[in-house]
Amino acid sequence: MLFENITMTEFEEGLKKTRTVLIPFGSTEEHGSHLPLSTDTLHAIEVGRKLAEKRPIFVAPPIHYGVCRSTSRHPGTVSITTETLKSLILDIVTSMRNQGLRNFIFLSGHAGGTHMAAIQDAGEKLMELFKDIRLAVLTEYQLAMEEGKGIIETSDDAHAGEIETSRIMHSHPQLVKGAGKKEYPNFPMGILVRDKRRFWPGGVWGNPELASAEKGRMIEEVVVNALDRFVDVLEKWEE
């Protein structure tokens, strides 16, 4: 049940089937010269839609902006602060709880460390505020790397590489512009740098040259299946 497609009556009927909602988190962030700025968001949205075809679950509209540090100087990246992200999460979940939802899955297509820490902090705060909710925080990257071990050839693939390029080649082939090149960032150990693009010019972390639409289809399928199993666990979780 996609929020943007259902009426208030359908939402009310949906609550009789499930109290679980998946909230997709993404970013507006560079993904090399070959993938769209919406790549992270598209991953999370697509998995949510496919999951909703398999089971009763609400899927919220995506949050298109995230906290982006390493790519902040690359063209097209639009970053928000951790405070903004946490405030947004607190407001959204509080309102959703008031509407009767109780199980919350934060699925982020953007896996940046600061970004994920902010989401987890907001989740912990919500758990303190509301004793009647269950909450989980996952990343697309985490699921794809774990479930796609037999599919992915690149050992250290993290951003706009084999995994993400394959996923977009499958789900949104019209948005793939050319072929990306193998690249890894070369940030100096321990030193904070202003001009991050100097140490990561192409914005790729991995090897998009090994990507294919078929790999994308396979990765998406195993991620959706893993998430389906995860929802079962969350809905039965007791402390």
Image (spheres, grey):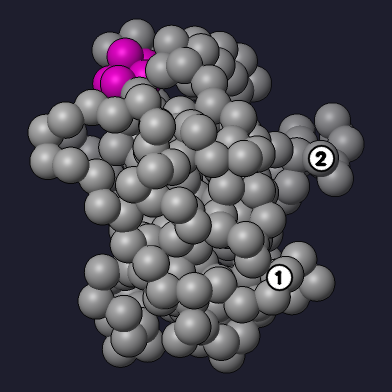
- The kind of secondary structure element at disc 2 is helix
Q: Is residue 200 above or below residue 127?
A: below
Residue 5: x %, y % from top left: 85, 45
Residue 31 visible, this orientation: yes
Residue placed most toward the observer, 177 or 148: 177
Q: Look at mark 1 in the image and give the residue it sits on.
A: 176
Outermost residue, front direction? Answer: 198
Identify the residue shown where x is 36% and y is 26%: 194
Name which residue type carries label 2.
Answer: Glu
Residue placed most toward the observer, 195 or 171: 195
86 with respect to 60 (left or right) = left
Q: Which residues are magenta?
A: 121-127
Q: Nearer the viewer, mark 2 or mark 1?
A: 1
Outermost residue, left direction? Answer: 190
Q: CA distance from mark 2 to mark 1?
A: 26 Å
Q: Is residue 78 above or below residue 218?
A: above
Q: Is residue 124 magenta?
A: yes
Q: Look at mark 2 in the image and give the residue it sits on.
A: 4
Q: Is residue 153 above or below residue 127?
A: below
Identify the residue shown where x is 76% and y is 66%: 175
Residue 101 visible, this orientation: no
Disc 2 residue crowd, few under 14, some 14–19, many 20+, Cα 10 Å: few
Residue 14: x %, y % from top left: 70, 43
Identify the residue shown where x is 51% and y is 13%: 84
Q: In which image quadrant can residue 69 be found?
A: top left
Residue 170: x %, y % from top left: 65, 78
Disc 1 residue crowd, few under 14, some 14–19, many 20+, Cα 10 Å: some
Identify the residue shown where x is 34% and y is 9%: 129
Name which residue type carries label 1.
Answer: Val
19 with respect to 158 (left or right) = right
Which is more N-terminal, label 1 or label 2? Answer: 2
Q: Main secondary structure of the magenta part?
A: helix
